[in-house]
Amino acid sequence: MPMKSKTLALLILLTAGLAACDRDELDLPDPEPPPAPIAEPEIPAVEEPPAAFEPPPVEFLGWPGHREDQTFGLTWLGGDEPLPLREAPSSESSVISELQWYDGEELPWDESRVRVLQPSPLVATESFSWTATPYDEEFLELESSEVILSVATDQPVFFYHLSGENLCFFALDHTVHLGDCIKDHLTPAEDHPSPADPLRPLEHQWWVLIDADDAYGWLLIDDDAPIEVFPREIEGMERFDDEDDGPPFR
């Protein structure tokens, strides 16, 4: 190795040694490790707001003018076209018979049901407690025990059907209940199409089971049927002084 190269190598080694000695004498800290990568913050999932309660169609025993001290009669007013009688109280049910009756004669019927397709939307004007009984639509009857419901201000309440004795069917918290007609605590919703008549469903159907010798099935009582509806007092029943008359018969 030439002298110049040896001299340069010795200088490099000497410099490195001096640097190491200086580091030990100064007690310099070891170089810090590179910082750990910063984790991306988790973005919470956006929860969808609960869907607004859509009150379903519900069926009840009774009639649109239901009062505890009344029943009704049906008189055939005539007409050339027979009326269809269906297997069940529904427009989608099969036609199983037809009705053509004697002019001015009363129709024989066995059962009456009201099917509410669209109840009346209301809201609570204040908070209150309501004692009511849950309704079982499958068996068209009330459950055995009452419950006490807490109703909050501005809570939606849906009126379905008047049951007589100042009792009404309302939907509250996705369940239909029967209890006092709490109309003093309720007001029509802002989008109510008939605010002057809040205790009447927006859309309903009235079905009567006709039971005659040559005609049997469910008849829809509407404005197209050539039938007069007349109330009939029930002997021995007294009307409550403050009982509502209920909606028109159809």
Image: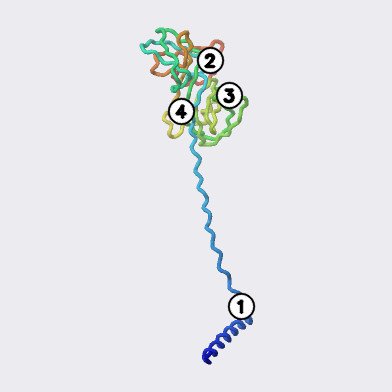
Quarter where residue 226 is shown: top left
Q: Secondary structure at mark 1?
A: loop
Q: Secondary structure at mark 3?
A: strand
Please tell me how crowded label 3 is: few (under 14), some (14-19), or many (20+) other residues with Cα within 10 Å.
Answer: some
The percent position of residue 30, horizontal first and vertical second, equals 60, 74
- CB atoms of marks 4 and 3 within 8 Å: no
Instruction: Tell me how far mark 3 sits from mark 1, CA to CA.
Output: 86 Å
Residue type beneath disc 4:
Gln
Q: Secondary structure at mark 2?
A: loop
* Residue in the picture at 47% in, 9% down: 212
- CB atoms of marks 1 and 4 within 8 Å: no
Residue matched to label 2: 69
Residue matched to label 1: 28
Instruction: Tell me how far mark 2 sits from mark 1, CA to CA.
Output: 103 Å
Residue type beneath disc 2:
Asp
The percent position of residue 29, horizontal first and vertical second, equals 61, 75
Residue matched to label 3: 142
- CB atoms of marks 3 and 1 within 8 Å: no
Instruction: Tell me how far mark 4 sits from mark 3, CA to CA.
Output: 21 Å
Please tell me how crowded label 1 is: few (under 14), some (14-19), or many (20+) other residues with Cα within 10 Å.
Answer: few
Residue type beneath disc 1:
Leu
Relative depth, front residue between 57 and 34: 34
Quarter where residue 38 is shown: bottom right
Instruction: Tell me how far mark 2 sits from mark 3, CA to CA.
Output: 20 Å
